Amino acid sequence: MQDLIVVSYNVNGFNVPQKRSQILGYLRDKKVGVAMVQETHFKKSYTPQSKNKTYTIWYNASTPIRRRKGVSILISKHLNFKEKDKIIDQEGRFILLKGLIGDKLFPFVNIYATIKEQLGFLKHVFDLIDSFQEGKLLLGGDFNIVMEPIIDSSRGNTSYPYNKLKVIRKLLHDRQLVDAWRSQNPGERDYSHFSAVHNQYSRIDLLFIGQNMLNSVQEAKFDNFLHSDHSPLIVTLSLTAKTDRPFSWPLNDSLIAPEPDSNFIATQIKLFFKENINEDTSWPVIWESHKAVLRGYLMQLGARKKEGKTAENFRINRKNTEIGEGAQNVMCKGH
């Protein structure tokens, strides 16, 4: 297996057999290796036994009394997963799971954040992660908060205090954790949840990875609303990509050597920062987005130069061929 497909999905209830069967079928059809599921609504005294032929390994965190909250991690039998350690919250809010897939060690963290006091909850989870992390961390779940209100909310704002939001961003930044979807979709808008109460779309379903895993991300997208009021977030990771060093893209210096090209690039950089710098967007997001946009411009420029060079080579070869054919005709006439 060269790719690992990970899904974070708030299913808004996983305890109804028919709905559970539909979601498991959906995960199987998408070839999901690891599913981080939130709001399972399992009661601790009664957690359904999985008889699914594909997802044979289940980890559940459930509430002790009422059927609410709850998170699960489902693992496909095709991964040959070998567990090393786990921490399961007794209130059904999070699971920390560490294990081997092939020769690679992954800690998977699945959370369903509280609707209020997200900062205190996340601080507690990060304290556990700091002592648990080993290998290539994937932190997913329903965070119940928009990290960048201007672009992650249809209204462009949030009721959550900005001073607390900045602390949460710093918790992520200090651990060099990057929003996998945003890294692949800089500057774009897409939402994972619709709140009928607030008449608002927002992107609160997230998956964070370490910066040194950025070059392993093949795709990150939201699928359609199918079984819930949340969209599943699907992230495809390459298991063969080298992730021991930070992501880098080698710049071809010849692309910015000519003055017209360097002037164009300089103008685009100034324009990007002028349009995107604001107090509501964190610098890590702005910086990563600017690099992705600039890389796109340079790749387009390189493609155009390559096409122009190919056309010029074709013209020269065609001309040389015509000259050769003309010389051959002259020689034939001479004989």
Image: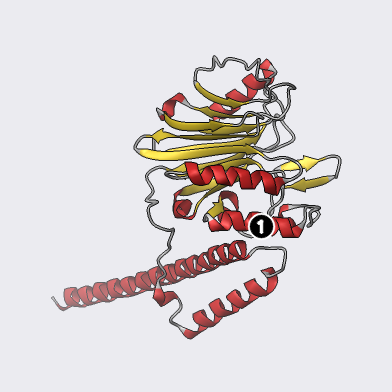
State how many labels appear: 1
The image position of residue 290, as x and y in percent, is: 58, 67
Residue 331 lies, with reference to residue 182, above or below; the image says: below
Which residue sits at x=68%, y=68%? 276
What is the three-letter code of the residue carrying label 1? Val
Which residue sits at x=69%, y=31%? 226
The image position of residue 165, as x and y in percent, is: 70, 56
- Name the foreground residue: 35 vs 185: 35
The image position of residue 319, as x and y in percent, is: 33, 75
In this figure, which residue is indicated by the disc labeled 1? 167
- Name the foreground residue: 186 vs 121: 121
User: In the current view of this chain or complex, which residue is farthest to the bottom?
Assistant: 259
Which residue sits at x=74%, y=47%? 202
- Name the foreground residue: 136 vs 255: 136
Find numbered disc 1 in the image and state the secondary structure of the residue it sits on.
helix
Residue 26 located left or right of residue 314? right
Count neighbours of disc 1 (C-alpha within 10 A) and say few if under 14, some if 14 to 19, many if 20 or more: few
Residue 154 lies, with reference to residue 88, above or below; the image says: below
Q: Is residue 229 visible?
A: yes
Residue 93 located left or right of residue 139? right
Q: In which quadrant of the rendered image does the C terminus lie?
A: bottom left
Question: Which coloring applies here?
Answer: secondary structure
The image position of residue 288, as x and y in percent, is: 56, 62
Residue 221 lies, with reference to residue 326, above or below; the image says: above
> Quadrant location of residue 157?
bottom right
